[in-house]
Amino acid sequence: MGSSSRRDVLRAAAVGGVGLGLAALGTSGIAQATTQAATQAGTPSEAQGERPPHEQGGARGPKIGILLYEGFSVLDPTGPAEVLSRLPNATVTMIAERPGLVRSDTGDVALFADRPIAAVRDLDVLLVPGGSEKAVLRVFDNARLMDWIRRTHERTKWTTSVCTGSMILGKAGLLKGLRATTYWAGKEYLESLGATYVKARYVRDGKIITSAGVSAGQDMALYLASQLADDRTAQAIQLGIEYDPHPPFDTGSPDKADPELRALALKLLADSQV
Amino acid sequence: MGSSSRRDVLRAAAVGGVGLGLAALGTSGIAQATTQAATQAGTPSEAQGERPPHEQGGARGPKIGILLYEGFSVLDPTGPAEVLSRLPNATVTMIAERPGLVRSDTGDVALFADRPIAAVRDLDVLLVPGGSEKAVLRVFDNARLMDWIRRTHERTKWTTSVCTGSMILGKAGLLKGLRATTYWAGKEYLESLGATYVKARYVRDGKIITSAGVSAGQDMALYLASQLADDRTAQAIQLGIEYDPHPPFDTGSPDKADPELRALALKLLADSQV
């Protein structure tokens, strides 16, 4: 069953249930209808084994590919995935050198890469997340990955990065002469790769959009959503994920931190990485 | 090798490389030393097969467990995981009814659950993410999961939720008479479960902390980090993930959206879910 038609079946079964607006959940009929539809479309355990939606065909929206590699930072791919997977008919595909589990920099979280790079040629959007220093260095040394990034970039509508993912784009030679951004501690290294560093949450130059550290991928993804669809759609996605941030502290930028806090931030990152 | 000692080996090998502060990357000796250390500690592909860090022992920090179930929203567990895995000596473990892949509500992303609920008894922190309406309904109907949540909660220091994860805590009977929050569209349903809804990014009542929709888990996790460690540590983590949000729009709260945008937000969520 195509992903669109499968979605239609399940959506129709929800009979007025509006996404996560659970106000109507008291009506047991909705739960019943939903359970039946879920059974028809495959139980949760069966769903684990079937082909992921992006391989089921039928999608007419943007094809977004996120490149995973051992030692990525978990929020770098998942923040943008949360945003971009809400675009109408979009598919977000996790890609790696080989299909299978790919562990994050702390070793705590593993994401599954559904597709190997060898099977992915055309993407509307390529996103390269950041990772630990040694993870990024391993990507630099991986000619297959670096070649794939360069070849894929030639055919994308957008090539994007989060955090130290910008270093990977830069090392691939894609940022020469461009304005770009990256993690706050990586300014000098980014410039050594031929880019002009810009202090911003995200920077667009041509079809390349680079983001600042880790969490900035969410801001970038909302901008990208506005470009792939329109402002109104991006605004609705922002509301859909209730992205009205209000952290308990205001120390998210090096300008807002003393030198000791900056050093502690880098120490905690390094200590947490396996 | 214990996770702490493995971290020490790799960290020592980085010879002055400060986490993601890549300014020193130009020195090829660092790359060399890092590659050698990575080889000694297991190549990336070998690392996929070995036991995850939380099973290697040696941790003295907080034990954080995140419960996955089919149809979770991908940012709900991963935003807090990014924050909490930076706490000194913390372990973040993905848990599900059965170990293995668990797919998100859009079907695009699969996280790996390292531990089955049957093997997890003591946690310092339990986090229950939100998911699609039918995913949450399936959890309601899963007596094993609901019982495990109740039993685990009895022994936690903190029991927390993101988005519609609050409904799961509520259905388990944990929010009766408490102040709590949830996704903006779920206020009425949360109150039907005996909680007093509070409009906030996160709400603490006793040892239970509930969060607003999806992205609010990051704000909650920074608060939780300050409680598990101290303000200074949480502030350094905020800087470490460069969480200085500046989205291109300001429509992340229902108060900032017209009724049509609210309806569109719910439609996009429902349409994106398999």
Image (cartoon, coloured by chain):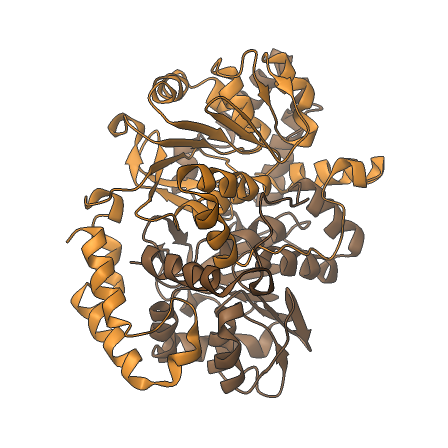
Chain colours: A orange, B brown
User: Which residue is more in the foreground, B203 or A87?
Assistant: A87
Residue at 61% x, 88% y: name it.
Answer: B177
User: Which residue is more in the foreground, A212 or B186?
Assistant: B186
Image coordinates of residue B198 in percent, x first then y, are 64, 75
User: Which residue is more in the foreground, B52 or B169?
Assistant: B169
Quarter of the image that includes the N terminus of chain B: top right
User: Which residue is more in the foreground, A136 or A201?
Assistant: A201
Residue at 60% x, 45% y: name it.
Answer: B247
Q: What is the total number of numbered labels drawn onto the structure image?
A: 0
Image coordinates of residue B114 in percent, x first then y, are 42, 55
Q: Is residue A63 left or right of residue A248?
A: left
Residue A212 picture quarter: top right
Q: In the rendered image, is residue A248 in sight?
A: yes
Q: In the rendered image, is residue B55 in sight?
A: no
Image coordinates of residue A85 in percent, x first then y, are 38, 48
Say above or below: A198 vs A217. above
Say above or below: A48 vs A90. below
Residue at 51% x, 53% y: name it.
Answer: A238
Quarter of the image that includes the C terminus of chain B: bottom left
Residue A26 picture quarter: bottom left
Say above or below: B9 vs B60. above
Image coordinates of residue A16 in percent, x first then y, are 32, 74
